[in-house]
Amino acid sequence: MDHIDRIDIRDTDGGAVIAVKVVPGSSRDRIAAVLGDALKITTTAPPQRGEANVAIAQILAEALGISPRDIQLVSGRTSAAKEFCFAGLSVQQLRRRLAEI
């Protein structure tokens, strides 16, 4: 994936936190691109009852080879701009995995 260095990723006590721009109700589930300082992810899930949030965590888990249980939404529950925390991963590890997508 191009422009991984532009994504806002920071270390926290719980793991690495990444900025994500979510596009729910899309035609397919995928990590689409880097958009500004966020990772743009599209999902077919609707933006209702947290369905898109769960779908985004699943998309990220599959792409990065980690368990969905290790991904937690930390901000933006009802917004398109979200932040997810990846337990047990550092910024460098997360950037490396994203680069391999």
Image (cartoon, rainbow, N blue to C red):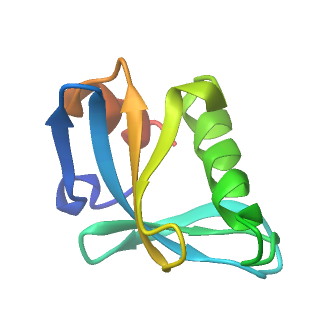
Classify residue 81 by image quadrant: bottom left
Horizontal arrangement in the rendering, residue 51 relative to residue 77 (left or right): right
Task: Name the residue located 83 percent from the left edge and 79 percent from the top edge.
Answer: 27
Horizontal arrangement in the rendering, residue 92 relative to residue 101 (left or right): left
Task: Name the residue located 67 percent from the left edge and 48 percent from the top edge.
Answer: 59
Task: Name the residue located 43 percent from the left edge and 69 percent from the top edge.
Answer: 76
Q: Is residue 21 above or below residue 7?
A: below
For the image shown, how many numbered marks are present on the structure? Answer: 0
The spot of residue 68 in percent (x, y) is 64, 32
Classify residue 25 by image quadrant: bottom right
The spot of residue 82 in percent (x, y) is 42, 66
Horizontal arrangement in the rendering, residue 94 relative to residue 7 (left or right): right
The spot of residue 55 in percent (x, y) is 73, 55
Closest to the observer: 72 or 9? 72
Residue found at the very far top of the displayed protein: 88
Classify residue 11 by image quadrant: top left
Task: Name the residue located 49 percent from the left edge and 41 percent from the top edge.
Answer: 72
The spot of residue 87 in percent (x, y) is 40, 24
Q: Is residue 71 above or below residue 42?
A: above
